[in-house]
Amino acid sequence: MSRIISIANQKGGVGKTTSAVNIAVSLAVTEMKTLLIDLDPQANATTGISDLTQDSPATVYDVLIRGIPIDQAITKTQFDHLDLVSSTHDLVGAEIELVSLMAREYQVKNALEPIKSKYDFIILDCPPSLGLLTINALTASDMIIIPIQCEYYALEGLGQLLNTIRLVQRHLNTSLTIAGVLLTMYDSRLNLSKEVAQEVESYFEDKLFKTVIHRNVRLGEAPSFGKPALLYDANSTGARNYMNLVEEILERVR
Ligand SMILES: Nc1ncnc2c1ncn2[C@@H]1O[C@H](COP(=O)(O)OP(=O)(O)O)[C@@H](O)[C@H]1O
Ligand SMILES: [Mg+2]
């Protein structure tokens, strides 16, 4: 059965893209057939594994706005079980262009319909806003993973995100659930990280993933080489954290 998972939080720089790329790659190396879809005009997920990808004839923009079938935008990567739908800067315009479309919240859901049974997992990397691209992702998804950076103001804006999730559940997608909340950039030397972890745990309880993503320079460096952490340095803390997370995700979806 295929599972569609959005990685979303309207705050920028919390680790959405790093998580989307490394979760997708870790799923693929455990032989789960996986599709990563870059829904951010900044295209960081695309460039983060672009070293491994064929040139894509079409992008997510063509699929959502020009109505091009998604199979024409799917490219292979160097990982046997991982495919990619890439993004480009064009997607900036989609946020506005979507407004005038019929069923504007359902464009991603409808685009995925013909191909979703081919995959075990479809991972959507969302942009840093609660606009129509993120709403489309949540409408299409079975689950959301919310990355939270262990920083000052970590919980700021979460109320708004949870409210958006509730609205989507009520009006657009009754089957959407929160797969889990993920602590990112955790630094065990800092009291602040521990305080944020405690605060998040007391709020989300068992929704908080036991696996924590530590602050790890390899995770920051890898994208500049167009590689996910598992290829850049498979033994790095970052690569191992994401492999452990994927084990936990697989347990939760079973
Ligand atoms: N665990 C981590 N340790 C160190 N750097 C990280 C970690 N996670 C993300 N980064 C870096 O932090 C920045 C923001 O992460 P990113 O995944 O792009 O966030 P978002 O997609 O939410 O904007 C990037 O430069 C990324 O390489
Ligand atoms: Mg991002």
Image (tube, grey):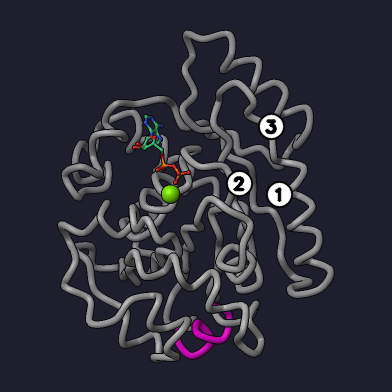
Q: Amino acid at mark 3?
A: Leu
Q: Quadrant of the N terminus?
A: bottom right
Residue 55, x across and y down, in percent: 17, 73
Task: Check residue 246 in the rendering and tell me which mark sits there, or answer none.
Answer: none
Which residue is located at x 56 percent, y 23 percent?
151
Residue 247 falls left or right of residue 38: right
Q: Amino acid at mark 1?
A: Leu
Residue 52, x across and y down, in percent: 17, 60
Please tell me whether residue 126 is drawn above or below residue 183 in the rendered image. below
Task: Check residue 155 in the rendering and tell me which mark sits there, or answer none.
Answer: 3
Which residue is located at x 79 percent, y 71 percent?
174
Could you give the CA–CA distance between mark 1 and mark 3, rounded to whole angstroms?
Answer: 10 Å
Q: Which comes before the other along the chain, label 1 or label 3?
A: 3
> Mark 1 vs ligand 1: CB under 8 Å?
no
Residue that numbered label 2 is attached to: 146
Does residue 25 belong to the magenta stretch? no
Q: Which comes before the other along the chain, label 2 or label 1?
A: 2
Q: Which comes before the other along the chain, label 3 or label 2?
A: 2
Q: Amino acid at mark 2?
A: Ile
Q: Quadrant of the C terminus?
A: bottom right
Does residue 110 belong to the magenta stretch? yes
Which residue is located at x 59 percent, y 34 percent?
210
Residue 192 falls left or right of residue 54: right
> Mark 3 vs ligand 1: CB under 8 Å?
no
Q: Quadrant of ligand 1?
A: top left
Residue 154, x across and y down, in percent: 63, 29
Please tell me whether residue 67 is drawn above or below residue 12 in the rendered image. below
